[in-house]
Image (tube, grey):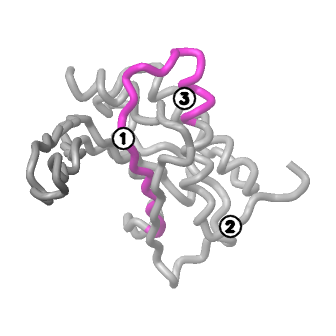
């Protein structure tokens, strides 16, 4: 349940803070196979329904602008995977630079304090896998990673999920059609 709640905020970060990467099978023919469907595992993904619906909608849009169409007998299957990790960062800031004393002596003497701020946060990664249905092998995988922001307003989540999925799909081998 904790994963489901944290994932609600996975794409609640600004698009600039989502780091993307990808990999693909260079022998796959992405232009020949132009139909897709959702892998059965997506429905069992341990995230809340609204977030899952927003991600699916964003991926459907990206596939549509690349002239793919949904099919009951698709060429490609789309699967999603979510990974969450607890991260920690520390920032140190020194205050005070010492003193010269009243006669110019004592360089480096005096007092100095160092404040250490420890920030704990969750980092989430969304994997979007495109699977060749015939071979059952992943032919493209896009990843988006970012810190989770638990304070984002609910009305902004959908738009931010769209931005994150669009950023992930920028590396897809088929570019969006210019007429969509």
Magenta segment boundaries in residue numbering: 139-161
Question: Dot 2 lies on which element?
Answer: loop
**Residue 160 is a magenta residue:** yes
Q: Is residue 27 left or right of residue 98?
A: right
Write the residue at 68% across / 71% down.
31
Q: Answer whether labels 2 and 1 touch (C-beta < 8 Å).
A: no
On residue 54, the disc is: 3
Residue ID for mark 2: 174
- Residue 140 lies, in percent from the top left, at 48, 66
Which numbered disc flags the more N-terminal residue, 1 or 3? 3
Q: Quadrant of the N terminus?
A: top left
Closer-to-camera residue (71/152): 152
Query: CA–CA distance between discs 2 and 3?
Result: 22 Å
* Relative horizontal placement of residue 45, taking residue 106 as reference (left or right): right
Q: Nearer the viewer, mark 2 or mark 1?
A: 1
Q: Are marks 2 and 3 in contact (CB under 8 Å)?
A: no
146 or 106, which lies in front?
106
């Amino acid at each position: 349940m904790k994963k489901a709640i944290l994932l609600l905020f996975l794409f609640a970060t600004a698009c600039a803070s989502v780091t993307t990467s990808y990999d693909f099978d260079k022998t796959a023919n992405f232009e020949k196979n132009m139909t897709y469907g959702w892998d059965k595992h997506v429905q069992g993904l341990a995230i809340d329904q609204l977030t899952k619906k927003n991600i699916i909608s964003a991926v459907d849009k990206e596939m549509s602008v690349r002239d793919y169409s949904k099919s009951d007998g698709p060429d490609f299957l789309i699967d999603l995977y979510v990974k969450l990790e607890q991260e920690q960062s520390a920032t140190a800031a020194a205050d005070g630079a010492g003193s010269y004393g009243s006669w110019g002596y004592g360089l480096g003497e005096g007092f100095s304090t160092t404040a250490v701020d420890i920030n704990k946060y969750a980092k989430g990664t969304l994997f979007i896998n495109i699977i060749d249905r015939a071979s059952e092998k992943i032919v493209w995988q896009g990843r988006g990673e970012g810190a989770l922001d638990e304070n984002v307003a609910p009305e902004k989540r959908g738009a931010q999920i769209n931005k994150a999925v669009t950023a992930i799909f920028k590396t897809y081998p088929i570019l969006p059609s210019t007429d969509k």
